[in-house]
Amino acid sequence: LLSSSNLYFLYLGMKKLLLLSALLIFACSSDDEGISTTEKQLLSIELFNLLKEDQCFEGENGSFEYENGKVVRVDYQHYFYTGCSGGFNYDFDATDYREYLHLDNKIIYTRSYDGIVQEFLTNPDGTAFGLDYSDEGYLNGANPQQWEWLGGNLVNISTDEGDNKVINYSDIDDRTGYLGLALASLASTLSGPLDLIMVSMCQMGLFGRGTAKLPSSVIYNDDGYFQIDYSYTLDDDGYPIYIYIDYVLANSSAEQYAIQTGQQATLKLTYTH
């Protein structure tokens, strides 16, 4: 049985740690500061286009199945855009899936491609057991990170080692209740343009309340300077159906092998009606 006390710390290394692919659950969130109760369920996220053809680019496309308002299965397909090695080519692996059993105080997760099974402890409200939340329900951070909130938005993530990330926001309400937090708290661009694991943790409410608005930019200052800008196309109900992502890079060695200056991508999202 895995305690969730180090959940976010483990997420930071999720591409190397098998445990963290377990966290994909849907949970609606509601509050009185601009985050509406989710009325539409997310059905799919996919890379719609990639505008620069000489870059390596990696991530996952995924589709979601629900029972009683909670995700019970996610079919996903890993993609690796191999433009850096010549030609416009998406190298798709076979489709795999993640399955979830929701119990009162834990989640049992099974992954198809290697058969791994994990259990994760949760609080009665669905947040991760052992993490620190404010009285308003916002995550205060998890070792080694501290999260700073202002006006219902996560505006800064820092560590004692001097790493720092600043998040700026648009004037667009986050109607989903979780996508804004998923974009704002994304640990690394190596996770892809919108990491499905992070989306899932925020859907579930593991990290508490989401952001009031959708972010307009995320600035990383942990190893040089690295910036991601976001813009959106919304449907008639105010849900983002396209997320446009521009990568701005300067003086950074940590990220340059993944994303370079001028890289642009578009994600397409679909929902229930």
Image: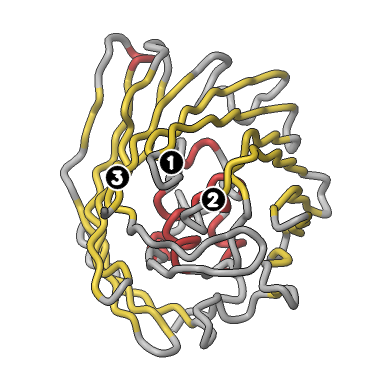
Residue 122 percent across, percent down from the top left: 50, 82
Q: Is residue 214 left or right of residue 20?
A: right
Write down the residue under mark 2. Answer: 174
The earlier-in-sequence mark between 2 and 1 is 2
Give the number of the disc on residue 270: 3
Alpha carbon separation for disc pair 2 and 3: 15 Å
The earlier-in-sequence mark between 3 and 1 is 1
Give the number of the disc on residue 240: 1
Q: Is residue 78 left or right of residue 127?
A: left
Residues 31 and 87: in front is 31
Q: Amino acid at mark 2?
A: Asp
Give the number of the disc on residue 64: none
Q: Going 44% across and 78% down the picture, which residue do you hit? A: 120
Q: Residues within 10 Å of mark 2 (few under 14, many from 20)?
A: many
Residue placed furthest toward the left: 94
Up-down relation of residue 235 to residue 2 (above or below) = above
Callout 3 secondary element: strand
